[in-house]
Amino acid sequence: MPGPRRRHSQVADSGKQWRSGTAVTCLLDVNVLIALIDPMHTHHERAHDWFGSIGKSAWASCPLTQNGVLRIVAHARYPHSPGPPAHVGALLARFCAQAEHHFWADDLSVLDSETVKLDRLLSSTQMTDTYLLALAVKNEGCLATFDKRLVTDAVRGGREALHVI
């Protein structure tokens, strides 16, 4: 009998098993989403390699990540902007129209001490990543990111839910 299947993303190298044999949905952080839609992004190839082999089977975005992409990529100073928010929004909408995409509502509070340990955060700049990691845990998924410096112990179950690309 074969051994247990491992999560397709090897989330935080934890070796956690797949749930019911299905792929774990990865919430893509803002930088990963941008890298996927911007062919000139520093991590474009890395993001596409990961997405093509692992991420595309089940992935998610949320209002915070979608707004972040629009805010950054549609900014006049973004070096490779395809244009104003309407153009970036249309591009992002086409990307999110993929059948494997899941939309996760922003429906948790960082003030929930059962989920988030605010005393583990050293700076307010850690709030967004902490929130996204907590959202991934709440949805029994993972957070896909390029950031190796997330404070995973600020979120109950955070270490197991982090996938660094």
Image (tube, helix red, strand yellow):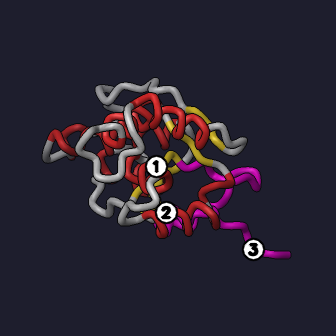
Report x, y in % for residue 31: 38, 51
Q: Report the front residue among 140 and 125.
A: 125
Disc ID at residue 47: 2
In this view of the protein, can residue 96 be seen by the observer? yes
Question: Looking at numbered disc 2 in the image, what kind of residue is underneath it?
Answer: Ala
Marks 1 and 3 in Cβ contact (< 8 Å) = no
Residue for point 59% across, 47% down: 59
**Secondary element at image label 2:** helix
Compared to 160, does 124 lie above or below?
above
In this view of the protein, can residue 115 be seen by the observer? no
Kindly identify which residue carries mark 1.
Answer: 33
Question: Looking at numbered disc 3 in the image, what kind of residue is underneath it?
Answer: Gly
Q: Main secondary structure of the magenta part?
A: loop
Disc ID at residue 3: 3
Residue for point 28% across, 38% down: 75
Furthest-front residue in view?
83
Disc ID at residue 134: none
Report x, y in % for residue 117: 27, 39
Q: Residues within 10 Å of mark 3 (few under 14, many from 20)?
A: few
Question: Looking at numbered disc 1 in the image, what kind of residue is underneath it?
Answer: Leu
Q: Which residues are magenta?
A: 1-26
Of labels 3 and 2, earlier in sequence is: 3
**Secondary element at image label 1:** helix
Instruction: Measure how far apart labels 3 and 2 are at the Cα level.
Output: 29 Å
Report which quarter residue 71 is drawn in. Answer: top left
